[in-house]
Image (cartoon, rainbow, N blue to C red):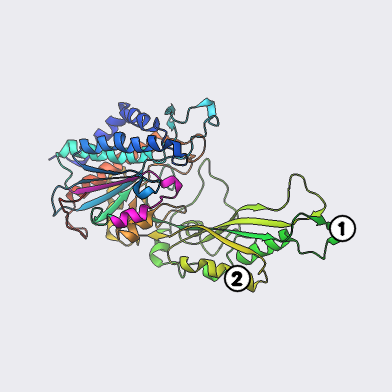
Amino acid sequence: MPNREDLLVAADKYVDSGELFEDLSELVACPTVSTDPSQRVATNSYLDKNLRSRLEGMGFTVRLDLDWRGSGNSFLRAVRTEHRDYTTVLCYGHADVVDGQAGQWEQGRDPFVLDAQGERWYGRGAADNKGQHLVNLKAFEMLLAQRGELGFNAVFLFEAGEEIGSPQLDEYAAAHREELAADLFIASDGPRLSAQEPTIFLGARGGATFELSIPLRAGGYHSGNWGGLLRNPATTLAGAIGALVDGHGRIQVPGLLPDELPDSVRQALQSVQVGGGAQDPQLADGWGDTSLSAAERLYAWNTLEVIALQSADVARPVNAIPGEARAVLQLRFVVGTDLAGLEAAIRRALDEAGYPMVQLAMGQCFPASRTNPDNPWVRWASESIQRSTGVPAVVLPNIGGSLPNAVFESTLGLPTLWVPHSYPGCQQHGPNEHALEPVLRQGLKMMCGLFHDLATNTTLPRTVAASSEKI
């Protein structure tokens, strides 16, 4: 019987031969920019030609739903059912990338040509998300080549709109709940804690963006003639922001905080260290809720940040009281926060602090979700990754940023395991996005080990019976 060590050796050979670089080059060359509607043809072609052919070559039955219900998002789902008594895993990835930002890359690099400089492989999508889902697909191929079967049932869901907020992904999952039914969700996106530390994260913080505006009057009035008589919208805005979050980053409104920090989450973060990488910024002393560790503040608590602020022209100030002021704030929040009550909580806090003149407009909001760190699948994955790498995996209850994890954890009701193959310094979404070859290599070996161990698992929870009629 072939063993997992043979798979790990094969993974090294695949990387050493240059095949991983060649395969990723082909994917990066597709300009699948979802923020540019003119590239929708390229994005749909990526789903159809690049992903469909690879999945069908592994014996999956593939269904494409292009521009589903006019959403601007396209979906691919693929199913391979081997036996109704086998465990079923649902995997996810996204085909789209952000704008290439041509002309802004170092050394004149073309964002859609993969370029190796030492261990860094530069190209749009190399880290987010093409390199990551390529690694996972290749692990499936290698397992099939070794065993002749997976030893479990598998479902893939790819979308083409993650970078524009995953329009209608939740509706699509709900509409195809039966076809996407599984025992476990495993996917790869986002960064590890660091390049050196294999990481599992179990969910994502939610986000709520809102604007505060004070349009008091048209134009400005001389500060010498009218100062002390006219309400200053910039001063008022500063006070209104301070009623929500103080000048040291501490949230002032209980309704913008979670009810508690669960013991299982606190324990999972006990030994996690944040920052310290070569490209990481210096952490600020005395910022945020200092009763919490840095890891707890980032991964287990809420933060409210001012991300834009405007009143008059700072570059060319005049001696006048401005007529208006605006700010955009963003709340990042964890499970246990009342998303439905956020707007009311903000409005009430502003009014009680004496700022009824401040207008509030809510923007994009998305929910938080996470799998409990005590879930037995988490321990299983941690042990598997340690067997493959020789080092313990860092388990994060959720990442600080956002991913559509709620679709899988809440809508589909699955334990969610994210195993990222990128790192915090990868410069995703900016010029010079890159993947690290050692991280991709280790990621491939981890996924080979995970899927091998899934095939031989007989003890972990089952929630579905496979159907040969999926799709």
Determine whether label 2 and label 1 are within 8 Å by CB. no
Question: Percent x, y for residue 416?
Answer: 32, 55
Say if residue 379 shows up in the picture: no
Above or below, 408 against 441 in this view is below
Q: Is residue 158 magenta?
A: yes
Residue at numbered disc 1: 224
Give the structural element (helix, strand or loop) at label 2.
Answer: helix
Question: Percent x, y for residue 255?
Answer: 52, 70
In this rendered view, identify the residue nearer to me: 183 or 175.
175
Marking on residue 349: 2
Q: Alpha-carbon distance for marks 2 and 1?
A: 33 Å
Q: Quadrant of the N terminus?
A: top left
Query: Which residue type does callout 1 highlight?
Result: Gly
Query: Which residue type does callout 2 highlight?
Result: Ala
What span is colored magenta in the figure?
A: 152-175
Above or below, 21 against 391 in this view is above
Task: Give left or right: position of 79 versus 390.
Answer: left
Question: Percent x, y for residue 184?
Answer: 26, 55
Task: Give left or right: position of 158 versus 325.
Answer: left
In this rendered view, identify the residue nearer to me: 304 or 363.
363
Say if residue 437 shows up in the picture: yes
Q: Answer with mark 2 or mark 1, whichever residue precedes in sequence.
A: 1
Q: Quadrant of residue 96?
A: top left
Q: Quadrant of residue 6?
A: top left
Question: Percent x, y for residue 19?
Answer: 31, 28
Residue at x-position 58% and y-position 48%? 282
Q: Quadrant of residue 262?
A: bottom left
Give the structural element (helix, strand or loop) at label 1.
Answer: helix
Residue at x-position 81% and y-position 56%? 221
Residue at x-position 37% and y-position 29%? 25
